[in-house]
Image: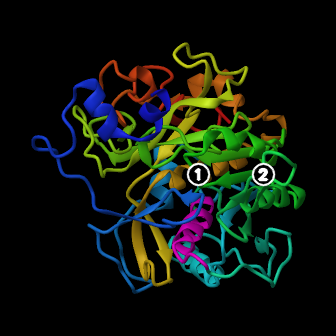
Amino acid sequence: MKKTLLLVGFAVVAVLAGLPAAGAGAAPAVPALKPFCTTGTFRCMSALRTDLPIVANATAAHSGLGPADLRTAYSLASAAVRNGKGQTVALVDAYDDPTIESDLATYRAYYGLPPCPTANGCFRKVNQDGEQGSYPAIANPGWEPEIALDVEMVSAICPNCHILLVEANSADETVATSNPAQHSDLGAAVDTAVNLGATEVSNSYGTAGPEPDQTFFDHYYNHPGVAITASSGDQDYGTVWPAASPYVTAVGGTELVQDPTTARGWSESVWGSLWPGVLPNDAEGAGSGCSLWEPKPAWQHDAGCSDRTVADVSAVADNVAIYDSSPEVGGWGVVAGTSIASPLIASVYALAGNAKSVLYGSYPYSHQSSFHDITEGSNFTPDTVCGYLCTAEPGYDGPTGLGTPNGTGGF
């Protein structure tokens, strides 16, 4: 029963908790989302906002938060500051995006960021074996906008960083518990990224199960001295892996809104929240919870979960602009998902330039004062059924972890 509560989602838990199921009563409207990469063992954690227009003209004004918004909201260095020099942020994705370099150029040109082409060494695309020129087939076109999102978030936060895109052959894995034949293409791509010199590695994908198998693949993410981030998931309360691995920084998601009534100028709550209230069954929101199988890292001390708790930190997961020329988007679009948050946090690690001293997700826990504490919202319902594991509160909580960046001091 415990596993059902954690992974199945709102409909089952609502019935067991005596709460109204989706459709019972008037639920507030939520943004219309079209998830990307909807097949495969691993799903990317992003979706297109279909309630906002697509702008096909590459130079036209469009909706969504851009680089200046994100850097201002999180008190990060401007593009003119050379923070991030010498850092290489790797993005691990499945399949190929043949137009990624031109899409990246469009994004950076529109926002006045310095060019980042292959020719000057700023951008590099390889397959999971580290080879250039021979890339995976486009077996799932939903990964193309995911790839665009990943590289463009690095550009937004750390425009001086080098970008390494490692394209895995597939979004699947092979498990053979009786012999050492376990294999994950995405995991192999993480090893390749580290072997090629990445100082930070972002993983904007995850799977909800079968969770006991996931520990077989933890070794792919076990790279002390490299900051490895993973999205916490987009299906509300419940954990996904590799965010649940003790070897990564698990990154949750928030709703970031300009708010002139606050000293900061921005307000944040748990992404997917309908505060105060409950989420409809088909809504998406930041994942969080208590793993059933992964051990608790020594640096986590929350009392309500004896195993690994997700998340560690968080960042914006909605209303962000990307440029993707593939048919999945076809220009400027606005996206949501914790796929935004993972590369953003990896890029903050790069701005800090401290990855060599990072031991998995431990560093932020010893620098808790360097975060915006998120205290509003829930990815389930604000009551005692799951408590801090699903509801934001002062200090640490599951959906937003320690909070969102307030400069680079926490990294």
Within the magenta stretch, is there residue 144?
yes
Q: Which mark is residue 176?
A: 2
Is the N terminus in the top left, top right, bottom left or bottom right quadrant? top left
Q: Which mark is residue 91?
A: none
User: SS at mark 2?
Assistant: loop
CB within 8 Å, label 2 to label 1: no
Q: Residue 353: in sight, yes or no?
A: no
Calculate the distance from the C-alpha at mark 2 to the C-alpha at mark 1.
20 Å
Which residue range is magenta in the image? 139-155
Within the magenta stretch, is there residue 114?
no
Q: Main secondary structure of the magenta part?
A: helix
Residue at left offset 67%, top offset 53%: 202
Q: Position of residue 148 (x, y in %)?
A: 57, 71
Front residue of 404/237: it is 237
The residue identified by callout 1 is 206
Q: Please, is residue 311 above or below residue 69 in the view?
A: above
Front residue of 89/145: it is 145
Q: Residue 300: in sight, yes or no?
A: yes
Residue at left offset 25%, top offset 45%: 280
Front residue of 357/47: it is 47
Q: How is the image coloured?
A: rainbow
Residue at left offset 71%, top offset 29%: 363
Q: Please, is residue 333 above or below residue 153 in the view?
A: below
